[in-house]
Image (cartoon, rainbow, N blue to C red):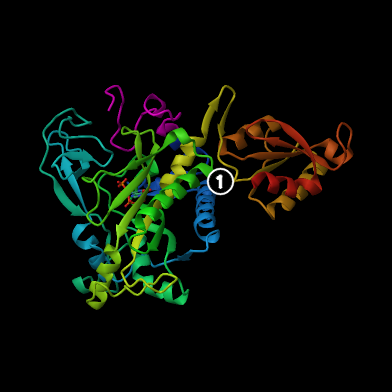
Amino acid sequence: MSRSTRYDTGRAPILVASTMTGARVSMEKIVNLAKRRGFVFPSAEIYGGFGGFWDWGPLGVLLKNNIKNEWWKTFVQQRDDVVGIDGSIITNPKVWEASGHIDNFFDKLVECKKCHRRYKIDVLKSGKWVTAEGEDLEDQSCKNCGANDWTEPKSFNTMFRTYIGPVEDTASKAFLRPETAQNIFANYELVRDTMRLKLPFGIAQIGKAFRNEITPGHFVFRSREFEQMEIEYFVVPGTDDKWFEKWVTACEQWFFSLGLNKKNLRLRKQSKEELAHYAKATTDIEYAFPIEKGWAELTGISNRQDFDLQQHGEFSRKDKSAFATAVDDEGKVKKVPFVIEPSFGVDRTALAFLLDAYEEQPDRLVLKLHPKLAPYTVAVFPLLANKPQLVEKARTVYKLLQRRFMTAWDDRGNVGKRYYSQDEIGTPWCVTVDFDTLEGAKRPKGTVTVRDRDSMVQEDIAIEELTDYLRAKLT
Ligand code: ATP
């Protein structure tokens, strides 16, 4: 960690990523833009917010929906071997017994004895501590006050508890899921049989997960409520190494296909010391986040072997091999399948795309989001708001485009200001209806200007060709 950096209680790190990793923007700027333009707000801000919880605003929800749609299109719709489910957030607590979450889903916490700042730590097999963001605390003084006097590590289970029904006793205790994966394992047999699936096949799910994080922070990077996009891909044991590599590549490619800068992404294989006890291999796709550690996990791909299915076999049927019925095309395999798990966080992914897209130019701020991710695909302006014929024509164009694309309307100020405003939220194309649209003079009648966000070049396009023009650009 650089000593010249300032760190503010884990919530608003004043760090510029470019000093460390090549990314170009501080987290503070993204937090400000996100709030000012309606991407993300502190949850219940009118009551002072609520640590570790965030509300996604009108533009944030469009961005997240686009991310989830693109993910689903790539990993479910366009594949023959993956189907989706939507499991319940609260489920039978036996699921969490079998998965090991009740016994093992603990975070370790140490506290600085002088300033009482708490840190989430991982204790490596060597006994060494690192914080969740990767700093080595044992050799380092407290980031907050500089002291080097720590409490012993304490453990606590990070699952949120709740009670089902009116009586709050042990029998009614349940948990909010800390990951979406276990719904998939618990439904493995039903999905396989109802969809007549043969190995290898995958089950995907997008949904909320909850973790009572000790130190939420770095904006939406680590929160207590977030969304995951996970796939459990079941394979014949022995083919798992090959599938693991294929999934690492497929996940990395997905980020590149949506324009993430290659130099801000890297693959990191977890060392034997770091691996979860059930994992044969884990590769993290890391992004150069503007946080102290710099590179941090964006997505993880794990070879979980047959651990989860064996556990659910044991806990539900007293038979570790209960799910050894999955067969390959020749009907030969009778082993419990191995599973490769690509696990994405929606919020962290949205944050990475926002950071990556942010560009300050001399006379404008532009979010160069991939057009498929931008909250609005197109904005429509009447050149002048006080000319009813212009406004009326522009409204028809707006209504036409709205049928196909998320479309913004803006008639405030002048066109320059409107471009500026749309650039800031990443709208790739702006359509202006002007006097030539109505009368034709310098341009043919019935045409509009389409201005490109990145090149700022304007093209003349006929209104009836606009939809096809934009569709072609998007694909
Ligand atoms: P970390 O080491 O950062 O705590 P993890 O290894 O616990 O992450 P996983 O359990 O592998 O994370 O979860 C898969 C993905 O879910 C992560 O790669 C991340 O994108 C997302 N994720 C996990 N915890 C959080 C959180 N508290 N807030 C936001 N996203 C999260």
Amino acid on which disc 1 is placed: Leu
**Main SS, magenta residues:** loop
Q: Is residue 408 visible?
A: no
Depicted 15 relative to depicted 286: above or below: above
Q: Is residue 281 left or right of residue 379?
A: left
The magenta segment: 1-29
Residue 162 falls in which quadrant of the image? bottom left
Instruction: Compare residues 259 and 360 and report the one nearer the observer.
Output: 259
- Residue 463 visible, this orientation: yes
Res. 451 image quadrant? top right
Q: Position of residue 123 (x, y in %)?
A: 17, 44
Residue 214 picture location, percent across and down: 25, 47
**Camera-side residue: 7 or 77?**
77
Query: Residue placed at 44% from the left, 40% from the top?
Result: 352
Q: Residue at x 44, y 47 (%)?
A: 249
Q: Position of residue 107 (x, y in %)?
A: 21, 50
Q: Residue at x 24, y 35 (%)?
A: 135
Count the labels in the image.
1
Q: In this picture, is 403 found above or below 439?
A: below
Q: Residues within 10 Å of mark 1 (few under 14, many from 20)?
A: many
Residue 136 image offset from top left, x and y in percent? 20, 34
CB of residue at label 1: within 8 Å of ligand 1?
A: no
In-image side of 474 versus 67 (left or right): right
The N terminus appears in which quarter of the rendering? top left
The answer to whether residue 27 is magenta is yes
Instruction: Give the answer, above or below, for where 295 lies relative to 237.
Output: above
Secondary structure state at the residue bearing disc 1: loop
Tell me the residue that label 1 is attached to.
373
Question: In the rendered structure, does residue 121 fall within the stretch colored magenta?
Answer: no
Q: Is residue 75 above or below residue 9?
A: below
